Amino acid sequence: MNFLQRLLSQPKAETTPARQAADKNSGQETSFTKDLSQLTPGLHVGKLSDIGQVRERNEDSLYAIHSLLQHNVGQEWFGLFIVADGMGGHQKGEVASSLAVRTAAECVLKDIYLSYLTNNNQSATNRPINEVLITAVEKANTVVQEAVPDGGTTLTIALVMGHSAYIAHVGDSRVYWFNQGTLKQVTKDHSLVQRLVELGQETAEGALTHPQRNVLYRAIGQGTAMEVDIYVQHLPPGSSLLLCSDGLWGPVKNELLREIIGTSGNPQEACQRLIAAANKNGGEDNITAVMVSIGIEN
Amino acid sequence: MIFETQRLEGSEPPKKPQNVNSDYDESKLPRGAVLQKRYEILQVLGEGGMGAVYLARDLRFSVVRKCAIKEMFSTAPDPQLRNLTRESFEREANLLVQLDHPGIPKVSDFFTETVRYYLVMDYVEGEDLENVLENTQGMLKEDTVLDWAIQICDVLVYLHNQTPPIIFRDLKPSNVMLRKNSNRVALIDFGIAKAVDATQKKGTMIGTEGYSPPEQYRGVASPRGDVYALGATLHHLLTKRDPRLEPPFTFHEEPARLLNPSLSEETNAVVMKALEYDLEKRYQSAQALKDALIAALKKDKSLIAPNPSASTQVLPPTAPASHTNILSGQPPVPPQYQPVQPPPPAQYPQYPPPQPYPAQYPAYPPQYPPGYPHPPMPGILTGEPDTELSDSILPIWKFKCEDEIRSSPVADKTTLYVGVYDNNLYALDLKSGQFKWKYPTEGGIAAKPFVYNDRVIIGSEDRVAYAISTGGRLIWTCPTEGRIRSSARVEFEHAFFGSDDHRLYAVNAQTGRVIWRFESMGPIRSSPTLGDELVYVGSEDGYVYAVDLSSGTHRWKFRSNRNVTSSPALFREMIIVGSQDWNIYGLDAKTGYSIWQVRTGQAVISSPVIFDEIAYIGSTDKYVYAIDLRNGRVQWKFNAGSPVVSTPAVTDEAVYFGTMGGELVSINRRDRKVRWKFKTGGPIPSSPLVFDGIVYIGSTDHHLYALPA
């Protein structure tokens, strides 16, 4: 991972095209499709986290797991993807984001994934997915508060089962959905500037350079009252979901995001090119991207 | 130039979000230190970003004369920057010393020692309003707060009238001191030079100042900003809702009076106008705000005895407004109905497992909820109107049958078909209600017909499913071994329906030939819903089944705790269904996994109907629920006054449903205001049909009504 990171992060003077790097080094995907909508059936996942050009530590954390069960009933896939962006400075952001990711992953794997593997018959005694996701976020909040007082992190979780993504979210990391050339932002940022934009007091453009664009009104580890946003996103074959920290969506605007995703052959290539683009535009923050694409049916 | 909050001796600052990054660690002056050979430091009153505030004694006097000394030093490494800071400090000290108002502590001296600056001023002994609020049980008195507000306005008017106008900029409860043993307040901590740190790293997450107006983040500072800050301060003082703990700029989602209904309408109006996000809509000056506050106080004082009927009912909000669609960017509309009780922490009620069938299963007619009186049976052949018509709406026509109508009608071009408990399937003219034909079966009809091409398919309690041509002639019959109360769904050339014989049937719609049967463990009264490959149905055995369309093989099943009479609805990859275990479930259509669950107060027999990504469903707990399918949260619930067994019908404008109290109700889909109610002579367990601007509904009072939608 370290090797890949160093290889792929752009030194300031160089302009090595990311595509070359991707072709050389993509050990993850070997499909030769020309765009994401032509992938083989099932889940395809790309993931990458990069320190950026300015920061001294990478305080982002990411978790990605996906599996395929093929049996008499057919194909059933499952994916869990988590991104957390820790608060910087001397408040140990990297500890907060790591704890949040691990705590949430454990909750979801235990209460949803493992029980789904062993118990084919669903029952009302199984807790609904939404409730498990909310509990996972609340638990992460408690753990971070105890272990890193005054620390904080964002936390964004996407659970993929079949053609649906179940998303739980706190903070200003984002989830985007890409389908047939269009890009949609699924989650809402819990930031001061987002409220200003909603009120018409600031433009979306202005928000990107606003001096207080980092100020959040909701984050993990910053208080006991926790309100978690929940989204359900349909994932038709050929579509993709992107989770990322603000180190990506800050320097890389929607247009460029859309273009890179739309011209990548597989999610890993997309992630590499996205991070390269963020670094090229300054790389002022840590950059993390996780992408999952649903292949088309035969 | 900052005056820090002055605190009572020994009291700790209350717990607040800290957004201060104290990088410096120069030590504070110790007790006993003497400045300028005149001021002896007694204790530290508070600390801020740029220095401390001390309680000191002026040694020039032989009596103990206390004063407050604000210390400030610049931490800038650049000497030029430090010079600038010194100059601005001197400028501001000279400005402040000229101010003369009872609500502002007077400045008496300023000096520098080494690299630090000091400002000497009156010590205001007392408690700041944030502390006062915390130490008060229940709400503060409205009159008292209004009085304080008027005093504060007075100070603001004074400051804004200076040349140039002085903007206070940092008004909040902790910056207002209530003088000891009095009702007089003073403003402290003039945030005049409080610069917003433009180089903030992501070290600051929470801690947005909830009292600042939105335009302040654009760098606009004006007297109207102080008006907003005072509005925010009042809102906090009157409701105990700390704006720093809430999403920014959400005051209008929770107006003061909503959180504290004892407030007068006038006071509420004044506070909310001061809190307008749009500069132009706010009070244009502190004077205007002061006048409005005085008027509100006068009115408040003049009320001798509060008149309950005169105050409007303000209802608490429903789900938190955090699900605004970011793409539309509109602020959420303040909701108006009953709050949704948050789901209790996951303690699932212990229900007995479903009883083995058929021996103990209660027979039809539908069990009215316990305690509900069975309506009197109206006379059958009298021909007299036997229903009370509400005067808000009159039917276009009504048709009388010989028994209860328990199921919903279905429309096709010009004809309305409905099954009646008098054993007949009726065909009526849609517009006029004129009788066309009826087909007699040998049992009561409690199911809804399905029109497929040239025929109508319907099941009867005589255990047979029929296909009748649209002209009224029999085409085929398909016998089963149990009464049929489930309504057929026809697609892909096949009719799917359930029977009390525990089976789900797939029958060729052309010939009536059974293709396959799926066996459950209880009667199937729920109507199936069809996906691309699977058919979904509930059973009285407590399960929701997913069965392969072509082969009838079982794919998955979901176990609820009681009968599933509700018919599932399919929305993209989600199945929505109610159960008599009081819950409404959102299940993954492919695996049956539970995604979300909404707990109601009683059994759910009604089926959900989906419109515009929202599922509408009734419960016997007397509410109609609207559930947002994007996240499984209840958007609102409407109190129908009596149990709702009927499935709602939804159009873009309105939601229609019948109640066991005998009413057909139509409410506006967006704001849930009642559009009209139509009372019939008996409970309405069936669902309305809306077709071409007309609502059709059958009632157990033996009539079928057609009403304008």
Image (tube, coloured by chain):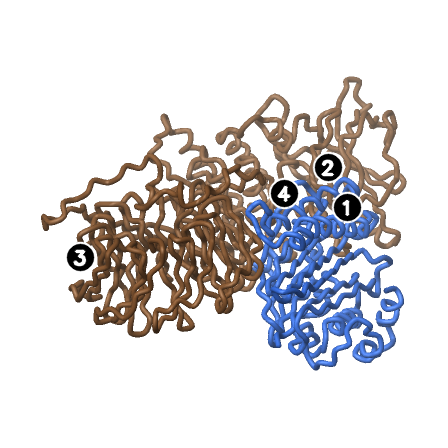
| Mark 3 touches mark 4? (CB < 8 Å) | no
Q: CA distance from mark 3 to mark 4?
A: 60 Å
Residue at point 90% right, 40% down?
Answer: B114
Colour in which chain A is drawn:
blue
**Chain letter for mark 1:** A
Please name which of the two marks, 3 or 1, marks the residue nearer to the observer.
3
| Mark 2 touches mark 1? (CB < 8 Å) | no
Disc 4 packing (10 Å; few <14; some 14–19; many ≥20): some
Please name which of the two marks, 2 or 4, marks the residue nearer to the observer.
4
Specify the amino acid type for callout 2. Glu
Mark 2 and mark 4 on one chain: yes
User: Which residue is tagged 1?
Assistant: A151
User: Which residue is tagged 3?
Assistant: B399
Disc 1 packing (10 Å; few <14; some 14–19; many ≥20): many
Specify the amino acid type for callout 1. Gly
Colour in which chain B is drawn:
brown
Disc 3 packing (10 Å; few <14; some 14–19; many ≥20): some
Position of the N terminus of chain B by quadrant? top right
Mark 2 and mark 1 on one chain: no
**Chain letter for mark 4:** B
Mark identifier at residue B245: 4
Residue A228 in the image: state x and y as whole percent.
Answer: 62, 49
User: Which residue is tagged 2?
Assistant: B4
Q: Earlier in the sequence, mark 3 or mark 4?
A: 4
